[in-house]
Image (tube, rainbow, N blue to C red):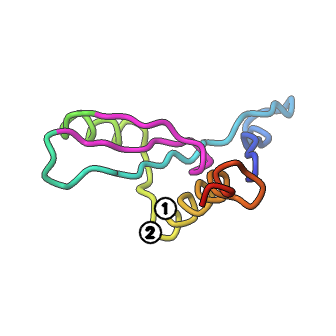
Amino acid sequence: MTVHQPAQARHPGSSDGAVVPLPLTKYVRVRSAPDARFVEFDFSINDPTLFVELVLPPEAFKSFCATHEVRHMTTEQAAAVDADMEKWRYGDDTLMARQR
């Protein structure tokens, strides 16, 4: 798994060459059914494989997404996250791999 460090850049209007962090990409992956009473979702910052699981009412979820300017994970990104989780859970040199 790749560890992502916050990107930095020189501030364009700064004569002293100050370094400022670039905006981080925020991702959501909805896990609940579209008509569910609550939205269950994964939220990650800059690295889709490192996430927290959250639950919000639908209107609060919409507000959360707008406030944080999130990107919804693509099918390909979700598959990559799942594959990474499986690798760590059932990899060749783990206790769980020996149980299969």
25 sits left or right of 21 in the view: left
Q: Quadrant of residue 42?
A: top left
| Magenta stretch: helix, strand or loop mostly | strand
Q: Which residue is mark 1?
A: 78
State the CA–CA distance, disc 1 to disc 2. 5 Å
- Pointer 1 with pointer 2, Cβ within 8 A: yes
Residue 49: say if magenta: yes
Of residues 93 and 77, the one nearer the viewer is 93
Q: Say which amino acid is labelled 1.
A: Ala
Q: Say which amino acid is labelled 2.
A: Thr
Question: Callout 1: 10 Å neighbours few (<14), some, many (20+)?
Answer: some
Residue 79: say if magenta: no
82 sits left or right of 66 in the view: right
Element at label 2: helix
Q: Which residue is mark 2?
A: 75
13 sits left or right of 58 in the view: right
How far from the left and from the top, in percent, is residue 49?
A: 59, 50
How far from the left and from the top, in percent, is residue 87?
A: 66, 59
Q: Which residues are magenta?
A: 38-55
**Which residue is at 44% across, 69% downward?**
75
**Which residue is at 73% across, 53% downward?**
1
Of residues 41 and 85, the one nearer the viewer is 85
Residue positioned most to the right: 16
**Which residue is at 13% across, 40% downward?**
37
Residue positioned most to the bottom: 76
> Which quarter of the image is occupied by the C terminus?
bottom right
Element at label 1: helix
Q: Which mark is residue 43?
A: none
How far from the left and from the top, in percent, is residue 91?
A: 70, 58
